[in-house]
Image: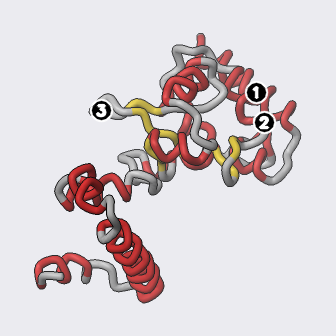
Amino acid sequence: MSSPARARLNLTVDPAVRAYVDEVADDVRRRLLEQLNSADGPTALAVLGPPAEAAELMVSALPQPSPWADAVGPVYRTPAVRRLLGGVSRQALVDRARRHTLLALRTADDHLVWPTFQFEGSHPLAGLARVLGAFDRHVDEWTLASWLRTEQAALDQYSVVDWLRTGGDVDRAVEVAAATAARWQR
């Protein structure tokens, strides 16, 4: 690795983060070399394109920070959610967002991102679809995402997401959502 590339890696000083990145990089390096040294290596190299594009493809599966990171938290890009949910199609995800069973956020550059808080492992957070269904389809999705993570007095100071994640009553969360939706429509 060139010294400018190494210098860029020195931005992270947390030893645990450094160890994690090093382990992932070593594993990716090993797997990539195995694939590129195989009989299909030249074809794979052409498909991967320039190294920067290959790296972008690899990190696209990671949760991405957003400008709303404090309020909304990290987000997944669409390819990551498709994999997370077992290979569902892009259209199936868009349909779920349209039906308000998953929350998609449209970025300024017209991409959809998906808040990570709405997933538990490889499944949507139980009860969240019912909460989302309480809101009009015209509610600003960024505002809704922020609201879902804001403490609610009616939920004993839990956010809706934390309430659901800790096994709180879904009907109560839906009632709070319906009351909020009614206020927002005034």
Mark 2 Cα shell of 10 Å, populated few (<14), some (14-19), many (≥20): many
Residue 146, percent from left and from top = 54, 39
- State the residue position of label 3: 108
Amino acid on which the number 2 mark rests in the picture: Gly
Quarter of the picture containing the C terminus is top right
Task: Provide the secondary structure element on which disc 2 rests.
Answer: loop
- State the residue position of label 2: 127
Q: Nearer the viewer, residue 177 or 92?
A: 92
Q: Marks 3 and 2, Cα distance to the nearest angstrom? A: 29 Å
- State the residue position of label 1: 130
Residue 41, percent from left and from top = 29, 62
Q: Nearer the viewer, residue 120 or 44?
A: 44
Q: In screen coordinates, is 94 left or right of 2?
A: right
Amino acid on which the number 1 mark rests in the picture: Arg
Residue 75, percent from left and from top = 48, 47
Depicted 57 relative to depicted 97: above or below:
below
Upstream in the sequence, badge 3 or badge 1?
A: 3
Mark 3 Cα shell of 10 Å, populated few (<14), some (14-19), many (≥20): few
Q: In the rendering, which numbered label is found on residue 20?
A: none
Task: Provide the secondary structure element on which disc 3 rests.
Answer: loop
Q: Marks 3 and 1, Cα distance to the nearest angstrom? A: 27 Å
Q: Marks 1 and 2, Cα distance to the nearest angstrom? A: 5 Å
Q: Residue at x 86, y 31 (%)?
A: 171
Depicted 51 relative to depicted 37: above or below:
above
Q: Nearer the viewer, residue 58 or 30?
A: 30
Q: Residue at x 36, y 33 (%)?
A: 111
Upstream in the sequence, badge 3 or badge 2?
A: 3
CB atoms of marks 1 and 2 within 8 Å: yes
Query: Residue at the front extreme?
Result: 39
Q: In screen coordinates, is 65 left or right of 181?
A: left
